[in-house]
Image: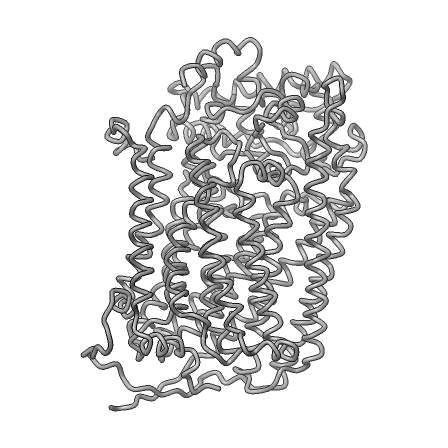
């Protein structure tokens, strides 16, 4: 049989590796800054760097820049070797690399200017969404091209994970990014309220599943056996792991919306599948850890294995905790508190972070044909970062439980013991200090790691094109042993792609179809009316500033929440919300009924609060939005916005777009007059007026005078 | 969105049978997978699991 000679492309692996750790440092640094902003709100000193604008930069940088480049590094290295072929096209590799870096830069540049679609982990606006799609397709062509030109008949399990990742991320990204552009940098989600929430968390949950998990599992199945120099513990288990994981994961999204206005059956579905998810997740974790059977003595000396062990253990902890958090009574505590923050950081810092560094410490010396610059530094990195994780997550667990227990306490007389949300914020401040310390430790570790990697690269020489040889793949497949179905699919990438797609799409379709199509799932409430033009403009500023990152608009049906915020939220209240703004974490109180009942404040209170939150709320950690007092509201967009809303089904009267600005100005003058009464002089043209209008509107649809209609409609549900 | 299929789906009776069908498909596939994996040829599995290690790059 003729042996073919070819070369592996190590340069592209190197490029993605460097991009991964350099962006990783940026993402972690921004994380540290926002952790400090929660302690020292004065650090929100310019409008481009408030918590609300930096937080999406942190999450996007860590997920898509640090882990994203980490994925491509791992895929480009392992795929070539498992397929015994160079990457399909060097040009596509380069376009993929530079295209992805461009996306990251555009993301950072737009997010600081408040250009956001307002949906967590999918904040990027539509032109960048399209660019992501194009680059992802290029990655797919390059990956499948390599698979098609391979010299190894069977596809190793790592490749299945890569294939499932590619197809599922494509599906999630496209479905969740459906939006109606009104300008180059502004669009409205095509979905509204409950539907938007369901699509967003189906995406958000599965971004964790298919961006942060499956590609990294593929990398675990390749790099861990390499590092341990022994085969994976059970290949059979890996087959079960793969199919069960991708099938079940896709269903679990609604666990992010427990006790919300999402229909009950969808919540229950999310819970059941989340609990089932323990089985395949732990199957994978056990498979990873047991790969080290007989090699545990090496873990003591081999820093790469150390990183792997902590990564896989963190994966096990996070995937046990995740299903527990999907149980309603547990979720009641974790949702909106720091428990969720702790949970995601076990995954991000432990699983993704440590696995990335394990692979980097294994891979960089190999492609640079040298030894790791300093094992001692790598060990220091390991211990500093491990302590960093502990200092990060333990205070966050503590903080979550503390806040939950404070907010639900009643006096013997039956009123809230701590009616002011700020009481709970003040109580968890010490935990925030510790968290920032933990984050700083982790970042210090990462800096040491990056220094170590750069010095390693410096002392070696990159083997850009690595010689390899393998016999060409014969056209005739000679079967040996007993045949079975999976063996058939293991050498057919397209069938694998289709089967994986079918597996992931079933869950999505089952969840979506009824919610989209059955009217009874989203009961309409007659008293719920579209936003006025001024309120709509105010809402867009609310979205721009990322207010939803700290303030939820979803009152759950708990005694403490109803007592604090008012009547619990109904699905029908959100039908005109493009995008929904339910939020996922409360650093401040819920705002769903900010404009009514006990929560109602005067216009001047809001004005002063936005100008300087601590002047009216002692101890508040909210950034100052004094720039809203200076910036003029851009009313040139009103017409377009109204027309876009009409296209999306919001029932403004025909031709309303032409007169919308008249109504806007009228309402602005009313608010100006109300402010004047309280001796606040402000032009009616300022942004703050629109924001006040929006905040005062929140919850007004279901007030006492409207209650009769609402009850009537609820009775019909 | 999806208005073109909306009118058909709204008239569907017992749409709640969908999750049950999906669950059934999942169980069938899962059990079949267990059986296939259990009955797989050991030599063949050995060959596959050594794939990452059978490279000459180290």
Q: Position of residue A598 (x, y in %)?
A: 68, 18
- Measured as percent of width and height from the top left, residue A56 is found at 59, 48
Tell me if B7 is positioned left or right of A449 in this view.
left
Compare residues A704 and A42 and report the one nearer the observer.
A704
Instruction: Locate residue A245: give its quadrant.
Output: bottom left
Residue at the spot 39% in from the left edge and 78% down from the top edge: B51
User: Residue drawn 69% across and 62% down?
Assistant: A443
Q: Can residue A62 be seen by looking at this rendering?
A: yes
Colour mapping: one colour
Residue at the image point whose x is 61% and y is 85% from the top = A371
Residue A30 located left or right of residue A422 = left
Between A412 and A446, the residue placed more toward the observer is A412
Residue A188 in sight in this render = no
What residue occupies the far left of the structure in this picture? Answer: A476
| Quadrant, the N terminus of chain A | bottom left
Horizontal placement of A368 versus A466: left or right? Answer: right
Residue A326 sits above or below residue A709 on the image: below
Q: How many tags in the picture?
A: 0
- Residue A195 in the image: state x and y as whole percent: 42, 34
Q: Is residue A140 above or below residue A625?
A: below
Residue A668 x, y percent position in the rendering: 61, 20
Task: Tell me: A629 left or right of A699.
Answer: right
Say which quadrant the C terminus of chain A sits in.
Answer: top left
**Relative height, residue A344 to residue A517 (above, below):** below
């Amino acid at each position: 049989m003729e042996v073919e000679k070819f070369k592996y492309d190590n340069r592209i692996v190197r490029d993605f590796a460097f991009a991964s750790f350099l962006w990783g440092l940026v993402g972690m640094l921004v994380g540290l800054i926002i952790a400090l902003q929660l302690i020292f709100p004065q650090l929100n000193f310019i409008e481009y760097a408030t918590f609300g604008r930096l937080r999406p930069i942190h999450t996007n940088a860590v997920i898509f820049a640090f882990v994203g480049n980490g994925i491509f590094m791992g895929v480009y290295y392992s795929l070539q070797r498992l397929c015994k072929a160079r990457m399909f096209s060097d040009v596509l590799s380069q376009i993929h690399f530079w295209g992805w870096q461009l996306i990251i830069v555009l993301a950072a540049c737009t997010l600081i200017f408040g250009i956001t679609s307002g949906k967590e982990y999918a904040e990027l606006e539509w032109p960048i969404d399209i660019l992501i799609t194009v680059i992802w397709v290029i990655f797919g062509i390059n990956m499948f091209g390599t698979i098609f030109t391979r010299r190894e008949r069977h596809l190793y399990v790592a490749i299945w994970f890569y294939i499932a990742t590619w197809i599922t991320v494509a599906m999630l990204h496209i479905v969740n990014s459906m939006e109606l552009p009104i300008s180059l940098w502004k669009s409205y989600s095509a979905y509204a309220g409950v539907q938007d929430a369901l699509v967003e968390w189906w995406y958000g949950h599965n971004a964790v599943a298919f961006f942060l998990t499956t590609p990294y599992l593929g990398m675990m199945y390749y790099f861990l056996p390499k590092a341990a120099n022994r085969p994976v513990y059970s290949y059979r288990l890996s087959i079960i792991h793969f199919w069960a994981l991708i099938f079940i994961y896709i269903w679990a999204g609604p666990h992010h919306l427990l006790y919300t206005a999402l229909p009950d059956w969808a919540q229950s579905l999310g819970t059941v599948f989340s609990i089932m998810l323990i089985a395949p997740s732990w199957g994978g974790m056990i498979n990873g850890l047991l790969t080290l059977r007989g090699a545990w003595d090496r873990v003591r000396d081999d820093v790469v294995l150390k990183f792997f062990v902590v990564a896989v253990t963190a994966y096990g902890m996070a995937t046990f905790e995740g299903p527990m958090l999907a149980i309603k009574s547990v979720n009641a505590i974790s949702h909106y508190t720091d428990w969720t923050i702790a949970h995601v950081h076990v995954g991000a810092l432990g699983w993704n972070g440590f696995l990335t560094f394990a692979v980097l410490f294994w891979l960089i010396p190999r492609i640079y044909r040298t030894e790791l610059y300093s094992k001692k530094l790598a060990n220091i990195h390991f211990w500093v970062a491990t302590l960093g994780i502990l200092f990060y997550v333990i205070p966050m667990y503590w903080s979550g439980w503390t806040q939950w227990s404070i907010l639900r306490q009643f006096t013997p007389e039956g009123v809230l013991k701590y009616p002011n949300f700020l009481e709970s914020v003040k109580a968890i401040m010490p935990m925030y200090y510790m968290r920032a310390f933990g984050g700083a430790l982790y970042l210090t570790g990462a800096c040491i790691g990056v220094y170590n990697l750069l010095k390693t690269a410096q002392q070696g020489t990159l083997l850009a094109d690595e010689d390899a040889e393998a016999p060409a793949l014969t056209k005739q497949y000679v079967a040996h042993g007993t045949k079975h179905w999976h063996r058939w699919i293991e050498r057919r990438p397209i069938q694998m792609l289709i089967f994986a797609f079918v597996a992931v799409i079933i869950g999505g379709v089952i969840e979506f179809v009824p919610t989209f199509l059955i009217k009874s799932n989203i009961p309409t409430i007659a008293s719920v009316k579209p936003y006025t033009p001024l309120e709509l403009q105010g809402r867009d500023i609310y979205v721009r500033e990322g207010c939803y990152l700290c303030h939820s608009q979803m009152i759950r049906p708990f005694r403490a929440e109803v007592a604090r915020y008012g009547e619990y939220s109904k699905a029908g209240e959100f039908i005109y919300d493009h995008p929904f703004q339910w939020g996922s974490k409360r650093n401040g109180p819920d705002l769903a009924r900010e404009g009514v009942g006990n929560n109602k404040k005067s216009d001047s209170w809001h004005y002063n609060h936005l100008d300087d939150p601590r002047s009216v709320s002692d101890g508040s950690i909210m950034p100052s939005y004094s720039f809203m007092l200076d910036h003029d509201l851009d009313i040139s967009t009103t017409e377009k916005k109204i027309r876009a809303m009409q296209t999306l089904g919001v029932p403004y009267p025909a031709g309303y777009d032409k007169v919308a600005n008249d109504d806007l100005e009228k309402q602005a003058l009313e608010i100006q007059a109300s402010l004047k009464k309280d001796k606040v002089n402000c032009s009616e043209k300022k942004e703050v007026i629109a924001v006040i209008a929006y905040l005062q509107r929140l919850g007004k649809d279901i007030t006492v005078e409207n209650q009769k209609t609402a009850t009537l409609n609820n009775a019909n549900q | 969105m999806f208005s073109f299929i909306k009118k058909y789906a709204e008239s569907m009776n017992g749409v709640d049978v969908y999750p049950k069908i999906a669950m059934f498909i999942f169980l069938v596939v899962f059990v079949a997978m267990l059986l296939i994996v259990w009955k797989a040829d050991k030599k063949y599995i050995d060959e596959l699991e050594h794939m990452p290690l059978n490279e000459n790059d180290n």
